[in-house]
Image (spheres, rainbow, N blue to C red):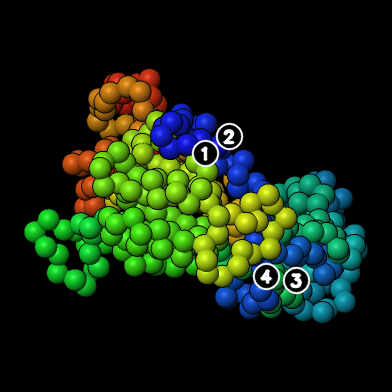
């Protein structure tokens, strides 16, 4: 599986994804934490959450109206005696017999004897009598006790990413705190003599370090903990020191220095550190020079305990230095490993589709992820490419809200065609 970088193992996009998926499948989280519900948004659950009772614990009305016996509605309109009222949370001990009705509110417990709820819109009340104007089938507008879950049922599984629905489930079963996996520490190393810190005035031929910050933001959004390393110069010894420091984290992301230039030293230095390279490029744009491999842990903190075969090694990605390439390759590849280290259940990469507003012309041979704007409303969504000057055009990607995915065998896509898009 591993290759020497001089061999330049360049894979199709789908094959490169599968390589990363295979490696990620053996990874495990490095620890667990017990945290309050409002502290676990975006984190990954490390324990199962079970129902503490039947849900709902009683037959629940789903509409405001009248609880009745369906058999009384064989002929409509029909008049029934109103014998009481029940509201949500009330403990009235009411029952319904033939010829009777109980006024009921949404969420209230359905009285014994009643087997259906007629919506208030189909009734007309006068004093203690109500006229039912529409037939209703037995069980309509009632959720039976235990229909959503039985006591002891598993509601959430370990590996679940906790968003607002999952937080609601945990709260509904009385869990004010839950056990989540520890955040993976992801080291970020930007490289190159042309790169300076954001608060340093750049020289005429220098650029500010945007990659470390965009990657840190992506890591945070994915539930990881970014560790920003100093910028690595184009000098082998210092680069080696910083790579070793980065390999003490759970995952190392290197921005820049992985192309074929004379001063692109990352692969050379990693080779001297006896790194394994699984691929040294993927047939995509932007991001073709992406590198993926693993290397022995650095000289800092010891490797975390793990049941995987990589317990003394850490994975690294060499991401192309152009900013859009860095962003795209993180989402397409690096996030797979970050999710695995967080203990998240693996998810397949899914594209949605929208109509193309304007024609696309490009060259064949690469699978392309091009910055675009998705617009429209409701079911009428359209997408068009953002004008950009290549993968270094930060302003273009900031204007975009998705990427149009162009297959490698298409050189022209006509306006009006449905095209796959990757949301961001």
Q: Is residue 355 left or right of residue 200?
A: right
**Can you see residue 131?**
no
Quadrant in which residue 92 is drawn: bottom right
Horizontal side of 111 relative to 240 (left or right) equals: right
Within-10-Å neighbours for mark 4: few <14, some 14–19, many 20+: some
Disc 2 crowd rating (10 Å Cα; few below 14, some 14-19, many 20+) is few
Horizontal and vertical percent position of residue 208: 22, 62
Mark 4 and mark 1: span between their CA atoms?
A: 30 Å
Tell me the element at label 1. strand
Circle nearer the N terminus (4, 1): 4
User: Which is closer to the viewer, label 2 or label 3?
Assistant: 2
Q: Decide: is 286 above or below 339.
A: above
Residue under circle 3?
A: 173
> Which secondary structure, mark 2?
loop
Mark 2 lies on residue: 1
Task: Quote the CA–CA distance across marks 2 and 1.
Answer: 6 Å
Mark number, residue 278? 1
Label 2 and label 3: CA atoms lie apart by 47 Å
Q: Secondary structure at mark 4?
A: strand
Viewer-nearest residue: 296 or 204: 296
Label 3: how many residues lie within 10 Å, few (<14), some (14-19) or many (20+)? Answer: some
First in residue order: circle 1 vs circle 3 = 3
Instruction: Give the mark, 2 or 1, whose residue is nearer the N terminus.
Output: 2
Q: CA distance from mark 1 to mark 3?
A: 45 Å
15 horizontally vs 262: left or right: right
Mark 2–mark 4 distance (CA, rounded to whole Å) = 32 Å
Label located before the other in sequence (2 or 3)? 2
Task: Look at the picture and state if 129 lies above or below 132.
Answer: below
């Amino acid at each position: 599986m591993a290759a020497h970088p001089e061999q330049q193992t360049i894979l199709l996009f789908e094959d490169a994804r599968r390589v990363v998926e295979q490696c990620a499948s053996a990874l495990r989280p490095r620890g667990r934490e017990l945290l309050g519900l409002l502290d676990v948004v975006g984190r990954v659950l490390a324990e199962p959450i079970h129902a503490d009772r039947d849900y709902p614990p009683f037959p629940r009305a789903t509409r405001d109206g009248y609880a009745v016996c369906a058999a009384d509605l064989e002929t409509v309109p029909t008049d029934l005696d109103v014998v009481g009222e029940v509201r949500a949370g009330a403990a009235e001990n009411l029952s319904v017999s033939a010829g009777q009705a109980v006024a009921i509110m949404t969420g209230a417990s359905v009285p014994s004897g009643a087997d259906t709820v007629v919506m208030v819109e189909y009734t007309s009340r006068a004093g203690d009598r109500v006229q039912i104007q529409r037939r209703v089938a037995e069980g309509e507008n009632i959720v039976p006790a235990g229909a959503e879950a039985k006591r002891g049922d598993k509601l959430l599984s370990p590996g679940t990413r906790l968003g607002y629905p999952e937080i609601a489930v945990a709260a509904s079963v009385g869990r004010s705190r839950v056990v989540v996996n520890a955040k993976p520490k992801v080291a970020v190393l930007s490289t190159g003599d042309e790169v300076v810190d954001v608060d340093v005035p750049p020289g005429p031929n220098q650029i500010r370090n945007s990659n470390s910050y965009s990657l840190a933001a992506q890591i945070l959004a994915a539930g990881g903990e970014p560790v920003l390393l100093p910028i690595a110069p184009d000098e082998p010894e210092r680069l080696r020191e910083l790579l070793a420091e980065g390999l003490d984290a759970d995952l190392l992301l290197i921005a820049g220095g992985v192309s074929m230039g004379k001063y692109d030293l990352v692969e050379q230095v990693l080779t001297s550190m006896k790194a394994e390279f699984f691929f040294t490029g993927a047939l995509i744009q932007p991001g073709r020079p992406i590198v993926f491999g693993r290397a022995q842990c650095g000289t800092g903190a010891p490797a975390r305990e793990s049941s995987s075969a990589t317990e003394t090694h850490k994975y690294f990605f060499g991401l192309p230095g152009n900013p859009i390439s860095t962003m795209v390759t993180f989402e397409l590849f690096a996030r797979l490993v970050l999710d695995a280290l967080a203990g998240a259940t693996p998810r397949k990469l899914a594209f949605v589709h929208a109509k193309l507003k304007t024609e696309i012309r490009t060259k064949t041979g690469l699978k392309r992820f091009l910055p675009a704007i998705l617009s429209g409303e409701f079911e009428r969504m359209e997408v068009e490419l953002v004008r950009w000057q290549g993968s270094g055009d930060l302003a273009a990607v900031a204007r975009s809200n998705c990427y149009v995915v162009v297959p490698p065998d298409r050189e022209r896509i006509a306006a009006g065609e449905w095209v796959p898009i990757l949301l961001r």
